[in-house]
Image: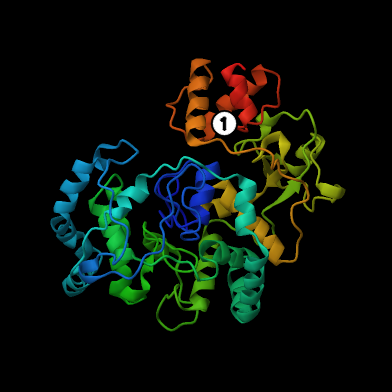
């Protein structure tokens, strides 16, 4: 997923699965998670639903057989997401697209190509439902990892690594990016090119550029998609992907393609859809430019001692691994840390009941690809498994159930009533909610790990 939209924006939207799920789990998201697993998990976690793969567009750019727009107001409450505003914008769609012609010309897109590539475009209003959906139920991080890091995907990944060994060799030499990370992204983003989404990127980005609450953001994506076609890197039939415009096996948004795509084999085109050489090199270039540190791993599973101060489990509170060791953190089976001077932060995604992880610089780089800690953890772990590593040693609190959106909303409201939460309850858990949870937990003498368990909710209810 090459980045995200306003929080998940670098690649806005391949809300197709892995990405969407992760983003919604550990990072509140809305319509944008730039890459994903396409149509595997509608309504997982607390973000938007992933877009299902759609049939090829019918006459006029519409989706043949696709589910129609509900005709209802969006759940976000944004004024541009009301049914009336959506209908009004849709009625003005042709004028909106035509109005972008001067901007396209400034980007070097010829008038002939602008007319050719925009002819027959119609708005896909079903995207408005996908953009603003708020599923009631979510999945836990352990279920998320179980779904994405499995034996079948591992077998496919090992086959891909063997089949394209020469390309991975050349890419590692040129960019210094670990082949297993690239292969993990490929596998989790599209299940090795089998689940990339089949919506027209032009139609999706044009719709979002003219209708709804993210028009300025998606105008850039739409014009960038036109640039890709104008230059000849890809053909229109190759520009198919998620409802928010992410495409290809590693789910590039058009703007990310412009920044990171490279011509790996020197044929004059940057084909990240059907050319494995370009795909592998471009994904590596993305990570390298985002700060990938050659020869370093992403992080380590650690055992957190009882009585630990979980207020330190914060992305902003990085310390050297040696300092973490002094606080009692250690690797399972007392394995040594290779570089004690490296800076890391502690992630405890299941609170005191689950494993901890010390996250290094390369973990932050993966999060630039997709700003969700759950996604980055899945990528790092999957890469280690492809390398021959073992599953996580410590167990997850599988007896815990995820709170429903209704319960999450109630929890936030109770935190407000008790003076711990200053935000607006919305049922989505970000850093501010976790900080409020930690403060409440500390006030009642339980581990302040920020984990939203059913026990915490019961305590807030005063039962």
Residue farthest to the right, as pictured: 334
In this orientation, which residue lies closer to the viewer: 284 or 145? 145
Q: Residue at x 66, y 37 (%)?
A: 400
Residue 94 in the figure: left or right of residue 366: left
Question: How far from the left and from the top, in percent, is residue 325?
Answer: 80, 39
Residue 1 shows up from this direction: no
Q: Quadrant of the C terminus?
A: top right
Residue 361 visible in the picture: yes
Crowd band around label 1 with a 10 angstrom C-alpha radius: few (<14), some (14–19), many (20+): some
x and y percentages locating residue 84 in the rendered image: 19, 42
Q: How is the image coloured?
A: rainbow
Residue matched to label 1: 434
Provide residue 70's location: percent of width, then percent of height.
Answer: 28, 48
Badge count: 1
Q: Can you give x and y, in whole percent of width and height, for residue 40 in the image? A: 50, 58
Which residue is nearer to you in this view: 70 or 25?
Answer: 70
Q: In the picture provided, is 415 more to the left or to the right than 341?
A: left
| Secondary structure found at label 1 | helix
Considering every residue shown, the one lying at the far bottom of the view is: 267
Q: From the viewer's perspective, is residue 78 above or below residue 251?
A: above
Whether residue 260 sits left or right of residue 296 in the image: it is left
- Depth order, front residue of 260/22: 22
> Residue 258 falls in which quadrant of the image?
bottom left
| Quadrant position of residue 382 | bottom right
At 58% from the left and 68% from the top, the residue drawn is 175
Query: Residue at the spot x=66%, y=29% of the render?
Result: 311
């Amino acid at each position: 997923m090459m980045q995200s939209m306003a929080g998940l924006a670098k690649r806005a939207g391949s809300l197709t699965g892995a990405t969407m799920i992760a983003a919604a789990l550990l990072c509140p998201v809305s319509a944008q998670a730039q890459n994903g697993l396409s149509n595997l998990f509608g309504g997982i976690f607390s973000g938007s639903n992933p877009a299902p793969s759609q049939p090829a567009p019918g006459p006029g750019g519409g989706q043949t057989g696709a589910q129609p727009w509900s005709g209802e107001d969006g759940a976000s409450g944004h004024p541009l997401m009301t049914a009336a505003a959506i209908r009004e914008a849709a009625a003005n769609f042709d004028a909106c697209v035509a109005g972008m012609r001067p901007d396209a010309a400034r980007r070097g897109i010829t008038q002939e190509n602008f007319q050719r590539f925009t002819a027959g475009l119609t708005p896909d209003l079903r995207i408005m439902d996908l953009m603003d959906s708020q599923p009631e139920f979510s999945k836990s991080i352990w279920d998320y990892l179980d779904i994405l890091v499995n034996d079948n995907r591992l077998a496919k990944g090992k086959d891909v690594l063997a089949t394209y060994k020469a390309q991975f060799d050349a890419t590692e030499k040129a960019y210094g990016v670990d082949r297993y990370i690239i292969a993990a992204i490929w596998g989790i983003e599209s299940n090795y090119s089998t689940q990339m989404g089949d919506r027209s990127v032009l139609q999706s980005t044009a719709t979002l550029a003219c209708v709804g609450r993210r028009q300025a953001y998606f105008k850039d994506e739409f014009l960038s998609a036109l640039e890709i076609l104008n230059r000849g890197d890809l053909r229109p039939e190759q520009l198919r992907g998620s409802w928010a415009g992410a495409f290809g096996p590693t789910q590039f948004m058009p703007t990310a393609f412009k920044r990171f795509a490279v011509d790996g084999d020197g044929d004059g085109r940057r084909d990240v859809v059907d050319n494995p050489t370009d795909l592998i090199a471009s994904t590596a270039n993305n990570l390298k430019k985002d700060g990938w540190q050659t020869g370093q791993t992403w992080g380590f599973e650690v055992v957190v001692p009882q009585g630990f101060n979980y207020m330190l489990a914060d992305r902003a509170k990085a310390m050297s691994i040696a300092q973490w060791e002094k606080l009692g953190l250690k690797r399972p089976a007392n394995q040594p840390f290779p570089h004690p001077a490296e800076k890391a932060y502690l992630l405890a995604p299941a609170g005191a009941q689950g494993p901890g992880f010390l996250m290094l610089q390369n973990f932050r780089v993966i999060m630039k690809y997709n700003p969700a800690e759950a996604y980055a953890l899945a990528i790092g772990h999957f890469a280690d498994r492809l390398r021959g590593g073992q599953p996580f040693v410590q167990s997850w609190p599988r007896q815990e159930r995820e709170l429903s959106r209704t319960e999450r909303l109630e929890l936030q409201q109770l935190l407000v009533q008790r003076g711990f939460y200053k935000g607006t309850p919305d049922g989505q858990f970000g850093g501010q909610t976790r900080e409020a949870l930690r403060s409440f937990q500390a006030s009642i003498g339980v581990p302040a790990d920020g984990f939203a368990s059913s026990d915490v909710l019961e305590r807030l209810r005063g039962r």
